[in-house]
Image: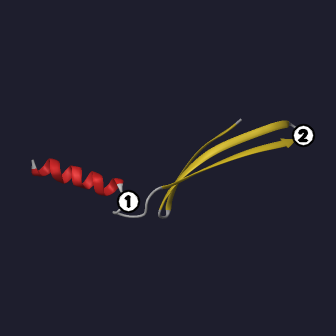
Amino acid sequence: MIRILAVLGLAALAGCGVDGEPIRPSMNTTIGVGNNGVSASTGATWTAGRTSVTVGTAL
């Protein structure tokens, strides 16, 4: 029972950001017009401290 409470307590602590900086999401979208027509791209970045993860697509 104590282990279950400890795991739930750690999950609650991690969920509220008390263990460090919260994860900050950001999103960007770019639309361009050039000689080759219209191009578009979109992406999302998640940043926590010095670490960031970016996922994006180009159309």
Circle 1: residue type: Gly
Q: Identify which residue is drawn at 33% across, 56% down.
A: 14
Q: Is residue 1 left or right of residue 23?
A: left
Q: Dot 2, how many residues are within 10 Å of its Cα: few (below 14), some (14-19), or many (20+)?
A: few
Residue 4 percent location from the top left of the image:
16, 47
Q: Residue at x 21, y 50 (%)?
A: 7
Which mark, residue 53?
A: none
Label 1 crowd (10 A; few <14 / some 14-19 / many >=20): few
In which quadrant is the C terminus drawn?
A: top right
> Where is mark 2, residue-wise?
35
Q: Which residue is drawn at 47% across and 64% down?
A: 49
Q: Is mark 1 on a helix, strand or loop?
A: loop
Above or below — where is 51 with respect to 27? below
The answer to whether mark 2 and mark 1 are in CB contact below 8 A is no
Q: Earlier in the sequence, mark 2 or mark 1?
A: 1
Q: Disc 1 marks which residue?
A: 17
Q: Determine the image quadrant of residue 55.
A: top right
Residue 50 position within the rendered picture, expressed as x and y whole percent measured from the top left:
49, 64
| SS label for mark 2 | loop
Residue under the image location 23 percent in, 54 percent down: 9
Residue 16, percent across and down? 36, 56
